[in-house]
Image (spheres, grey):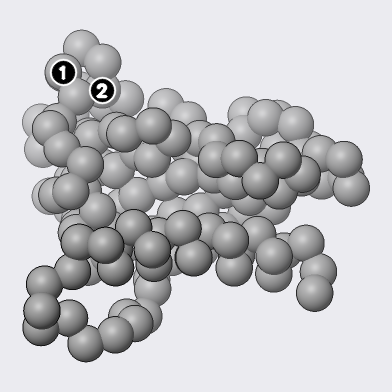
Amino acid sequence: MNTHTVGMVVALAFFSLAQAAEQDPEWDGTQPLKGHYQVYGGTLSEKLPPTPKDRKVAFVFKGLFAKDLFNQIGPDVKKEDACSSATNYRERRRGDVDCVYTKDSGYSCYFGLDVTTGKSTYGAIC
């Protein structure tokens, strides 16, 4: 199994376990995910090529999962701490998870995984 696959499996397991712990009785199993990821080295702003000793993955989730996560991690950050001052922009953070809502784009959630350590990291920058 390559490093990309391991990173995805760990991240999906993390969110699956978190969601499973809080599911209502009508919960009926796994759901599809909408999003993408980027593998990089260095920092998010540098986006250097990954190496065996420096490999991170930034994930972006959209749609229903992002909306559910947004609603679970509230409340909104203060306007002065948000990444945007746009009128219809809302942002919520918990640990390394950052979720935003805009009227035009809907819900998006970002988080990262440092594959070499297995620890979470930020998945987006302002």
Query: Residue 15's spot in the image, x, y percent?
Result: 40, 60
Disc 1 residue crowd, few under 14, some 14–19, many 20+, Cα 10 Å: few
Question: Left or right: 123 with respect to 26?
Answer: right
Disc 2 residue crowd, few under 14, some 14–19, many 20+, Cα 10 Å: some
Q: Give the alpha-carbon distance from disc 1 to disc 2, as whole Å.
A: 6 Å
Q: Quadrant of the C terminus?
A: top left
Query: Which secondary structure lies at badge 2?
Result: loop
Query: Residue 20's spot in the image, x, y percent?
Result: 29, 68
Question: Left or right: 38 with respect to 60?
Answer: right
Residue assigned mark 2: 82
Query: Which secondary structure lies at badge 1?
Result: loop
Residue assigned mark 1: 78
Instruction: Decide: is 81 above or below 66.
Output: above
The answer to whether the residues at label 1 and label 2 have Cβ atoms under 8 Å apart is yes
Query: Residue 31's spot in the image, x, y percent?
Result: 32, 80
Question: Left or right: 32 with respect to 41?
Answer: left
Which residue lies at the image location 14% right of the left edge and 49% below the top edge? 71
Which residue lies at the image location 15% right of the left edge and 37% below the top edge? 74
